[in-house]
Amino acid sequence: MAVAVDPSAAFHRAKDADVRYMRNRHPLLDLGWSRSDCVRYLTSLGLADTPKSSCLGCPFHGNAQWRHIRDSSPDEWRDVVEFDAAIRQGNARANKSGNPLLGQAFLHRSRVPLSEAPIDHVTAAEWAARQHELADANELEQGVVDGCSPWACRGDAEPMQDDFGLAS
């Protein structure tokens, strides 16, 4: 889904190009869309199962992403566990050239081998994201509290452009 306005990830990746003949574009940032806005839009198009994009061995995965790989793709889980073990002492070329890794490298933030990492622990951020999803689901089911009836507005809610903030 590319770069969106989620504060945890987007802005440090949305950089200008470092060459004059190229201009990076970030349409989701221009729209002000978050990841949940993107998921809601894709769901409306019947594309609800679009996974979050990232490299398989990304050290920025959260526990939910590691669990998903482990539980849904055993071959990929084996590969990423092997990769995690292989990076423990750093890059062979860097070690040979006199630039060894200080300490050990791990994919999981707990700094233990991925096969032993506490990925079944639900983090506070993941719990908060689940609560937000529940709030969105309740609004989809029950409607907006201050929304309109077919005859009149029940509250002071401002009119919206459309479901996705796009010009219609």
Image (cartoon, grey):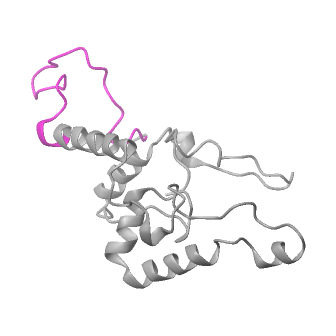
**Magenta includes 160?**
yes
Foreground residue among 31 and 127 = 127
**Which residue is painted at 57% across and 45% down in the image?**
10
> What is the x, y in percent for residue 71?
32, 73
Instruction: Find residue 60 and report its horizontal and vertical position in percent.
Output: 54, 56
Residue drawn where x is 49% and y is 64% of the image: 53
Where residue 3 appears, as percent x and y from the top left, is 56, 51
Q: Identify which residue, 44 or 34, lies in the foreground.
A: 34
In this rendering, position of residue 77 left or right of residue 159: right
Compared to residue 147, the image places residue 69 above or below, namely below
Residue that sits furthest to the right in the current view: 97
In the rendered view, tell whether residue 168 sits above or below residue 64: above
Residue at figure coordinates x 34%, y 43% from the top left: 129
The answer to which image quadrant residue 19 occupies is: bottom right
Q: Is residue 38 magenta?
A: no
Q: How many marks?
A: 0
Residue 51 seen in the current view: no
Q: Quadrant of the C terminus?
A: top left
Residue 165: image location, x then y, percent: 40, 38
Side of 85 where 21 appears, left or right? right
> Which SS does the magenta portion mostly show?
loop
Q: Looking at this view, name the residue that lies furthest to the bottom.
A: 75
Q: Is residue 123 left or right of residue 148?
A: right
Q: Quadrant of residue 91?
A: bottom right
Residue 26, placed above or below residue 102: above
- Magenta stretch in the rendered image: 140-166
Q: Residue furthest top?
A: 156
Residue 111's quadrant in the figure? bottom right
- Residue located 19% across and 16% down the image: 155
Q: Nearer the viewer, residue 1 or 107?
A: 107
